[in-house]
Amino acid sequence: MSAYATGSDLTTRYDIDLVGDLATDDRATLDRASVPGHVAVVAALNDPSGQIDVALQAGGRYTPPQLESLSGNSAYHLKRITCDIAMALLFRRRPNVRPDIAETLLKQSSEHLDRLRKGENVFGIPEVTDAGTLELATASTVQIEGLNLITERMRPYFPRTQQRMPRQR
């Protein structure tokens, strides 16, 4: 399984120089072209993907294949969640660099994961949305009469089935 976002997605959403600075340990400046594929960036994107998968299992609403097949705005939302968590993890590599931003990102990230753990409808997948819709199927009058219940055997004492059943529209 691959990450839900790529290094290019991360550098599109966040400053490429900041991502590069957070990814290096020796404080050397990375070439902009190498930032999306840097080992630390790839790891920072794989970790949130794993966290999202664990949250999905706990919530029971979505499966990883459903998330991989997302398109349109839902796919962008998933990439945003993954990139936010990845940036929070990159900031944790450097706790002395803007701890306020790191704290904000961690808070947002944990809110996203909590919603997934609770099984909330985060992505609006149609078959998942319809899962909460009840379809009511009732037995017909003829089927009930065919059961030979006591109400049918003792007609003088009970109203007829047609009188007890709601009218069908």
Image (cartoon, grey):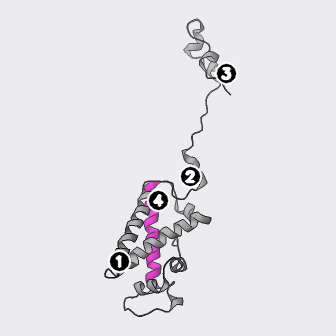
Disc 3 marks which amino acid? Val
Question: Along the horizontal axis of the image, is 147 left or right of 110?
Answer: right
Q: Which residue is mark 3?
A: 142
* Res 166 label: none
Among the two numbered marks 3 and 1 on one chain, the one whose residue lies closer to the N terminus: 1
Disc 1 marks which amino acid? Arg
Among the two numbered marks 2 and 1 on one chain, the one whose residue lies closer to the N terminus: 1
What residue is drawn where x is 41% and y is 94%?
28
Q: Quick check: can you spot residue 91? A: yes
Residue 122 on image: x %, y %: 51, 58
- What residue occupies the far left of the structure in this picture? 96
Q: Which residue is mark 4?
A: 56
Could you tell me what secondary structure mostly forms the magenta stretch? helix
Q: CA distance from mark 1 to mark 4?
A: 24 Å
Judged from the image, the secondary structure of the residue bearing numbered disc 3 is helix
Is residue 59 one of those drawn in magenta?
Answer: yes
Q: Quadrant of residue 20?
A: bottom left
What segment carries the magenta color?
A: 36-61
Q: Which residue is mark 2?
A: 128
Residue 7 on image: x %, y %: 52, 80
Among the two numbered marks 4 and 2 on one chain, the one whose residue lies closer to the N terminus: 4
Residue 135 on image: x %, y %: 60, 38
Characterize the local packing of mark 1: few (<14), some (14-19) or many (20 or more) Cα atoms within 10 angstroms.
some
Disc 2 marks which amino acid? Val
Which of the pair 165/19 is nearer the observer?
A: 19
Residue 92 on image: x %, y %: 35, 77
Judged from the image, the secondary structure of the residue bearing numbered disc 1 is helix
Q: CA distance from mark 4 to mark 3?
A: 45 Å
Nearer the camera: disc 3 or disc 1 = 1
